[in-house]
Image (spheres, rainbow, N blue to C red):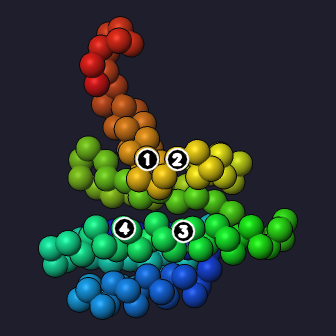
Amino acid sequence: MGFEYIFFDATLADALVSFAATLGVPGQVRPDPMGGWVVWVPEDMPAGAEDAIEAEYDRLMLCQRDVLDAADGADTNDVLGVQITLPSGQTCLVRVPPQLGRGLVAQFSFEEIHQLVTLIAKQALQPVEGPLWRKL
């Protein structure tokens, strides 16, 4: 098992692999069947490396957004990818369509988007019964 990060620019995918390597974390890049590239890193990594890689991914996502915005309507796979950990401990990548992804990124930080998508997945897999006002 490991963590996966989606990119639509090969240079940015390679940049995350290089960054992870500086932390002693080996990474791999593979093509994504839906378009783009997936960076994989193992979940067993030195202390603090996961947070540093997540922060670098957030920074690179901003760069990726700029690259996609610069394409200005070109035929691109403009999708937001959010990696979450399910209640079972399994990690997966949730792809958010362009129109929703742009709206989310315009209003929320990547951490807030991650928290929202994780909560939705948890609620879908483990629904809370009872009235809406019940504490989550």
Can I make out residue 2 in this image? no
Residue 127 screen position, x and y as percent: 34, 25
Q: Label 3 is placed on what type of residue? A: Met
What crowding class fits label 3: few (fewer than 14 Cα within 10 Å), some (14-19), or many (20 or more)? many
Q: From the top left corner, tell me how far across and down residue 110 is, in percent.
A: 47, 55
Amino acid beneath label 1:
Glu
**Contact flag, marks 1 and 2 (Cβ < 8 Å):** yes
Which of 90 and 57 lies nearest the eye of the viewer? 57
Lateral position of residue 26 relative to residue 31, left or right: left
Q: Assess whether mark 3 and mark 4 are in contact (beta carbons under 8 angstroms).
A: no
Q: Residue at x 26, y 44 (%)?
A: 87
- Which one is nearer the viewer's eye here, 41 or 49? 49
Q: Quadrant of the C terminus?
A: top left
Report which residue position mark 4 lands on.
54
* Element carrying mark 4: helix
Residue at (74% x, 67% y) in the render: 69
Q: Quadrant of residue 123?
A: top left
Residue 40, compared with residue 10, is above or below; it is: above
Residue sitting at the far top: 131
